[in-house]
Amino acid sequence: MSDKPAGSAAPPAAVVSPAHTAPPPRALPGGGATKVHRLVALVLDKPGVLNRVSSLMRARNFNIDSLAVSHTDQEGLSRMTITLHGDDVAVEQAAKQLYRLIDVLKVQDVTEEPTIEHELALVKVRVSDANRGEVLKLVELSKGRVVDLTGESAVVEVTGTEAEVDAFVALVRTYGIKELVRTGAVVMTRGAGSIEEALKR
């Protein structure tokens, strides 16, 4: 005979303590959707500047997709075009820190501005007597230029936006790519505005 009083209820089921469940993920600053950003920086043409810029981006956990550096019309002044992935907040913070670096004179995020974008690529494509005509036709349709041609390969120069260069590379990949080099994108804002003239004021 049971010792439980008549009509007594069954003991409640065991309840798992919330302490044993994983806490919800914390929202980190700058944790928004990532996208491609283009930063233009005017820097003094001095040793060590490139290293400081890339070190800052690495410290902020950015992977630089491409970095193009060139001279400008002003002596002693270089221009960097930095392409990277990140969310708006994180890239804005990185641009502000970049501007504080010694020898960095001006930084501009041109991601949302109307720009002209160009990239140059040299692609060494495998060719044979059977497919040489097809490859040369693709180069012509892509507005590229053959800069070297042998019995086994063709070196093609192609320019355009990153997407246009990607499209050409995808087309010739079926024939076999022996070697590929790309400059990375360089950009310039459309219209009369100028980051270099803004620096002079």
Image: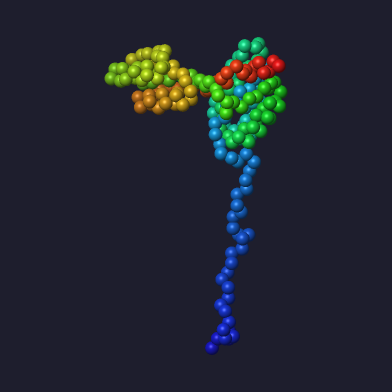
Camera sees residue 28: yes
Q: Residue at x 63, y 19 (%)?
A: 195
> Hey, which quadrant is residue 4 in on the image?
bottom right
**Residue 87, position as x, y percentages in the image:** 59, 36
Number of on-image labels: 0
Q: Residue at x 50, y 20 (%)?
A: 119
**Residue 143, position as x, y percentages in the image:** 41, 17
151 is higher (above) or lower (below) than 162: above
**Residue 128, position as x, y percentages in the image:** 31, 19
Q: Could you tell me which quadrant the C terminus lies in? A: top right
**Residue 193, position as x, y percentages in the image:** 61, 18
> Hey, which quadrant is residue 91 in on the image?
top right
Camera sees residue 47: no
Q: Nearer the viewer, residue 144 or 16?
A: 144
Report the residue that reaches farthest toward the bottom.
Answer: 1
Figure coloring: rainbow
105 is higher (above) or lower (below) than 14: above
Going by the image, does 110 lie left or right of 168?
Answer: right
Q: Nearer the viewer, residue 4 or 73?
A: 73
Q: Residue at x 52, y 21 (%)?
A: 117
Q: Could you tell me which quadrant the N terminus lies in? A: bottom right
Q: Nearer the viewer, residue 6 or 199?
A: 199
Q: Residue at x 67, y 18 (%)?
A: 198
Report the residue that reaches farthest toward the left.
Answer: 130
